[in-house]
Image (cartoon, rainbow, N blue to C red):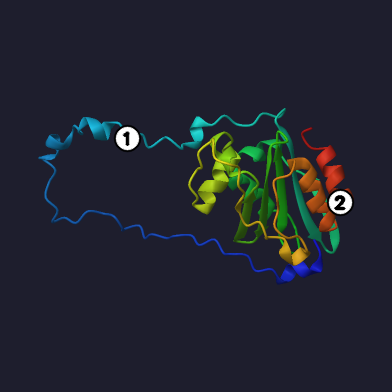
Amino acid sequence: MSATMETFAPKEVVMSRFSDDEFVPDDDVDDYDNLDEYDELPDDEDDYDDDDYDDDDLEDAGEDEIDFVVALYNDDGERTAVPMEPMLANDLDELITQLRRLPGDAGAVGMVSIDHQFYVIVRVRGRNVQVFLSDSTQANDWPIARDVADFLGEDIPDPDDDPETMGDGDMLADAGVGEFDMEDSDEILADIAARVHFGPQFERAANTSVR
């Protein structure tokens, strides 16, 4: 990445913390002898399904559906792009973990393209993480798109809604790239890489990735 990326200050991910003794019932709490009367819920409450948006309901993208997973970073001033493990295209948390392990001077940027339909961009600088999804409706079908929606705390749109972007579309503004759009996923990612001066490196890494 260009040197100007050092001035970028993305939002910090805040982790909640609980002590070991929280949520432990007091000794004074009544015993639970009378809980049997609550064993059955009314029929209308039984209809609730808390798994409506469970990632387990979504099938992972196969290698024939993953266009590429590529990481960009600067290492001692040298622009570097590397192909990453294809299955990272199904797991945002693990993708973030692997990006943190790269020796980038200003963190790393991960780019994922799925079936030429949509793309995900992740920028990681230590504990600071920014994510972008090019088509929010894909969260109904693909695990990593669902992961992005969950990470951002966004609702899953209806599959029939018009496609809209989701997340930090200006995460590379400090490198001269404005809001991302929803053009063909692999083409727009190649364009973004070129605009941040990783064009040839990105092309080599993408060509040696899954497809």
Q: Which mark is residue 175?
A: none
Where on the picture, by quarter, is residue 13?
bottom right
Where on the picture, by quarter, is residue 162?
top right
Q: Looking at the picture, how far across and down is residue 38, in whole percent?
A: 16, 37
Residue nearest the viewer, comparing 65 with 208: 65
Amino acid type assigned to the residue bearing label 2 in the image: Gly
Q: Residue at x 87, y 43 (%)?
A: 204
Q: Residue at x 58, y 44 (%)?
A: 136
Badge 1: few (under 14), some or many (20 or more) residues near its Cα, within 10 Å? Answer: few
Residue nearest the viewer, comparing 15 with 159: 159
Q: Looking at the picture, how far across and down is residue 92, in whole percent?
A: 60, 45
Q: CA distance from mark 1 to mark 2?
A: 49 Å
Q: Looking at the picture, how far across and down is residue 130, in whole percent?
A: 62, 57
Which residue corresponds to mark 2? 199
Q: Give SS at disc 2.
A: helix
Q: Looking at the picture, how far across and down is residue 154, in whole percent?
A: 50, 50
Q: Give SS at disc 1.
A: loop
User: With 63 as the anchor, is 43 left or right in this view?
Assistant: left
Which residue corresponds to mark 1? 48
Instruction: Tell me the quarter of the image containing the C terminus.
Output: top right
